[in-house]
Image (spheres, rainbow, N blue to C red):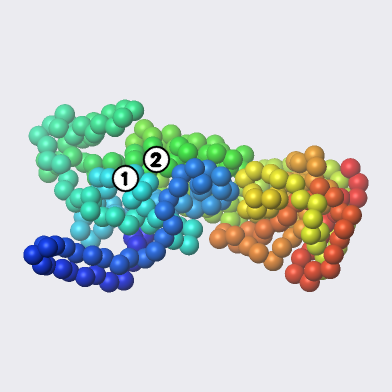
Amino acid sequence: MVISLLYGYCYQDSNDIPDTLTTITELGSPLEMIQLLQTSWEDRFRICLSLVRLLHYLAHSPLGSVTLLDFRPRQFVIVDGELKVTDLDDASIEESSCTSNNDCFMEFPARNFTLPCSVEARCQNMNEKRNLYNAYRFFFTYLLPHSAPSSLRPLLDVIVNATGELHWGIDETLAQLERVLYLYKSGKYLQNATRTPKAEYKRVPDATIPDENYRCWPSYHHKGCLLSVFDITEAIEICESYSQCRAFVLTNQTTWTGRQLVFFKKDSNHIMPDPDKITYVKVTG
């Protein structure tokens, strides 16, 4: 579901408070852009993907194409890692009427657009395009390309540029983001990478390294380097990209895409038993 669930409502009509409707909706976390910028790319991509799925639903809703006139981040909440719209007071299904293209003028702080006037005398896809450009300027430019896997950046740049220029509609934008998700979940984004380890690693099953942490960014753990990997080879590549990495620990935790969470360590002097983890120690290189 892309819109916060409505659990109940109360209508009140009294002399003190006339015509008041109170709603009880699904509880979510307020959207804090600064905090989002400090999260992993995988989680930021999830936010953007859920936003585009929302906009796709609004563009093809049973009521017609719905635009969000107030698109600021405070209109959204995060529920279980996904973005949902919580305030529909400023939603509209009215498509602007027109007699020529000049009537289909969309003005934004950084730039403006003129859309075609259709034969039905309506500005073509104006609601959809307004939502999409707002998604670009409030979300995509900050969340999509930053710290993304290097092999995915060219495709993400194409997506950001195409939405920023309104070259695509919501259908194509969603299709391209779903393609990024497929490449990322399947590991196909790693196929062109050099996957020959520079060092050898010793596998130590049922073991962990409780300390010896170092910080990296972005990380799922604020006091250590906890990242998601597709496979062991990618974990080795990440370890070899950090000069201080001497070992890594595979946990039994996964992210929303099914990728395994791995702790990267600066030493392996104190290995402890742990039936839920597997440790890999660099022995050469």
Residue at screen point 28% across, 29% down: 112
In the displayed structure, 151 sits above or below 186; it is above
Marking on residue 138: 2
- Tell me which corner region of the image, top left, top right, bottom left or bottom right, holds residue 141: top left
Q: Where is residue 2 in the image (x, y as percent from the top left)?
A: 36, 60
Percent coordinates x, y for residue 176 in the rendering:
45, 47
Q: Which of marks 2 and 1 is nearer the N terminus?
A: 1
271 and 158: which one is in front? 271
Q: Is residue 22 visible to us here?
A: yes
Looking at the image, which residue sits at the far right?
Answer: 284
Which residue corresponds to mark 1?
71
Q: Would residue 250 appear left or right of 282 to someone viewing this image?
A: left
Q: Give the Cα separation between the discs numbered 2 and 1.
A: 8 Å
Which residue is at a point 21% across and 70% down the rendered structure image?
Answer: 10
Tell which of 246 and 18 is nearer to you. 18
Q: In which quarter of the image is residue 21?
A: bottom left
Task: Give the vertical position of 106 relative to 231 (above or below).
Answer: above
The disc at residue 157 is none
Amino acid, disc 1? Phe
Q: Residue 157 vs residue 95: left or right? A: right
Q: Which amino acid does label 2 sit on?
A: Phe
Give left or right: position of 259 versus 115.
Answer: right
- What percent of the width, then of the height, locates residue 184? 58, 51
Q: How crowded is mark 2: few (under 14 residues within 10 Å), some or many (20 or more)?
A: some
Q: Nearer the viewer, residue 183 or 76?
A: 76
Q: Residue at x 31, y 71 (%)?
A: 7
Q: What element carries label 1?
A: loop
Frontmost residue, 81 versus 132? 81
Question: Could you say where residue 97 lies in the image, as x and y percent from the top left?
Answer: 12, 41
The reply to whether callout 2 and callout 1 are in contact (CB within 8 Å) is yes
